[in-house]
Amino acid sequence: MTVDRTTDRRRGAVATRQALMSAASALFAERGYERTTVRDIAARARVNQALLFRYFGSKQALFEQVVAGEGRRHLRRTPAEDVLESALRGLLAQEAGDAGDEERRHRALDIFLRSAAGGEAARVGRLLTEDYADVLATLTDADDAALRAELVLAWLLGIGLSGRVVGRGALADADPDRVCALVLECARTVLEKLPAQP
Amino acid sequence: MTVDRTTDRRRGAVATRQALMSAASALFAERGYERTTVRDIAARARVNQALLFRYFGSKQALFEQVVAGEGRRHLRRTPAEDVLESALRGLLAQEAGDAGDEERRHRALDIFLRSAAGGEAARVGRLLTEDYADVLATLTDADDAALRAELVLAWLLGIGLSGRVVGRGALADADPDRVCALVLECARTVLEKLPAQP
DNA sequence: CCGGTTTGTAAGCGTCTGCTTACAAACCGT
DNA sequence: ACGGTTTGTAAGCAGACGCTTACAAACCGG
C-alpha cells in the first residue's frame, strides 16, 4: 500500500514532471523563454531544480515539450471554423481574464509571442505556426490557400504582439467585440473574396 | 594643428560615439536587445567596452538612443502615403538585400521585432509604434482612424515577425510583389472602405 | 531485514553578463 | 615645457545563469 502522495513530501516522478511542466508553461507564457530561469520554474513547482534536469535534460528540452503539448491541445478541440475567432479573442485579452477562460486559452501563442525574439523559439515556432496555418488554410478554396492562411495568421500574431508589448493604445482600449468584427470580416475577405493573381 | 584621426589610434569622442551607435544599431537589428552584449558592440565598433559606459551610461540608454535616432529617421523622409508599402517591403525582405537598400530600410522595426519579447523594448516600442500609427492614421477619414491604423500596423508587424522567426513557409517563398498587392489592397479596405460600427 | 533502485536535496562549478576602477597615453592652453 | 583635461586600455567585481555532482532518504522486491 502506498502512502498518500499529496501530503507526502515525496510525490512521485510523474507528479513532479507534471508540476514542472505546468509551472514552466505558465512562466514561459508570462515572461518568455529567455527571461524565465530554471530556478524560477523549480521554485514555482516547489521542486528542486536538479530534478528539472533529471526529467527533461535541459531547459530547452523542457521548453519544446511544453510548447508541443500546449500547442496542439487547443487546436485539437476547436472546430476549424472557430479557430480564427477563438485565437483572436484570446490574443485580444491582455491578461488572463476569468479563471474559466484559462482552459480555453491559446497559451502556446502567448509563449510564442513572448519568446519570439530569441533563437530558441524559432524551431518550435515554425512547427506551431504551421499547425495554425494548416487549419486556417482549410477555410479557403483559393489555389494559394497557404499564403492567405499565413497572412491571416500573421495578422493575429501582430495583434497579439501589439497588445502584449505596446499595451496601451487605440487597439488595447477598443471593445474586443468591435475589433473582432473588423478583423474577422477583413480576414474572410482575404481568405474568400480577394481575387487570385498570376 | 590636429593629427589625422582616421589613421591615428585616437579618433576622438564624437567618432567613437558614432561608431558605437552604428555598431549597436546593426547588432540590435540582427539579434535584438538581450542577445546583443556590450562586448559584442564594443568589438564591432573597435572600441574598448568601458567607453560605451563613459559615453552612454548603460546598455539600456544606448539602446534607447539608437532606437530613437533610427526610428524616426525613415518616417521623416517618407511621404505618409508611401510609408505602408515602404515598411511592408522592408519587412518582407528577410536579410538585408542590396547594400543600397540599407539606407532606406526601416531598421527600427527590425530592432523592435527582434527585441519585442524583453521588457526593455516595451517603452521604446510604444513610442515607435505610436509614430507609425500616427502616420497611418492620416490615411483614413474614419472616426476610429487610430484603431484602424493600429490594426494595419499590427499586420505589418505580424508579417515581419513571421518572416524573421518562422522563416520558411508560403509567406517567405511567395513573390514580394504578390504579397504586397494582397496586403495593400486589404489594408486599404480596412482604412477606407470598411463601414464604421457603433 | 537487506540491497538496489527511485526520488529529493544541497552545494557548487564554469561561464557569461553589465558595469566599475585604476591607470597610461595623447592632447592642448598657457 | 608644464599641468590639467580628454581619450583609451586592462583588469576585475558581483551577480546571474544553465547545469552537474555527491549524497541522503524513501521505497520495494526478495
Image (spheres, coloured by chain):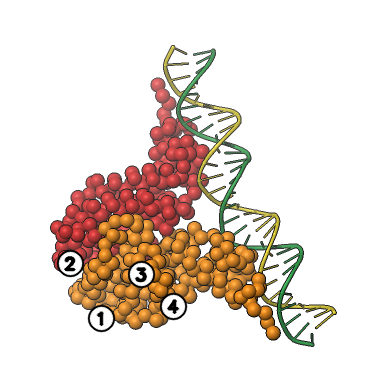
Chain colours: A red, B orange, C green, D yellow
Q: Chain of mark 2?
A: A
Classify 10 Å Cα crowding around label 3: few (below 14), some (14-19), many (20 and above).
many
Classify 10 Å Cα crowding around label 4: few (below 14), some (14-19), many (20 and above).
some
Q: Spot the residue most to the front.
A: B7
Q: CA distance from mark 1 to mark 4?
A: 26 Å
**N-term mark: 1 or 3:** 3
Q: Which residue is mark 2?
A: A197
Q: CA distance from mark 1 to mark 2?
A: 29 Å
Residue B119 x/y as whole percent = 46, 61
Q: Chain of mark 4?
A: B
Q: Chain of mark 1?
A: B
Is the same chain shared between marks 1 and 4?
yes
**N-term mark: 4 or 3:** 4
Residue flagged by tag 2: what amino acid is it?
Gln
Q: Quadrant of the C terminus of chain B?
A: bottom left
Q: Which residue is mark 4?
A: B73
Is the same chain shared between marks 3 and 2?
no
Classify 10 Å Cα crowding around label 1: few (below 14), some (14-19), many (20 and above).
few
Residue flagged by tag 4: what amino acid is it?
Arg
Q: Which residue is mark 1?
A: B141
Q: Chain of mark 3?
A: B
Q: CA distance from mark 4 to mark 3?
A: 15 Å
Is the same chain shared between marks 1 and 3?
yes
Identify the mark at residue B90; answer none if there is no mark: 3
Q: Quadrant of residue C12?
A: top right
Q: Quadrant of residue A137?
A: bottom left
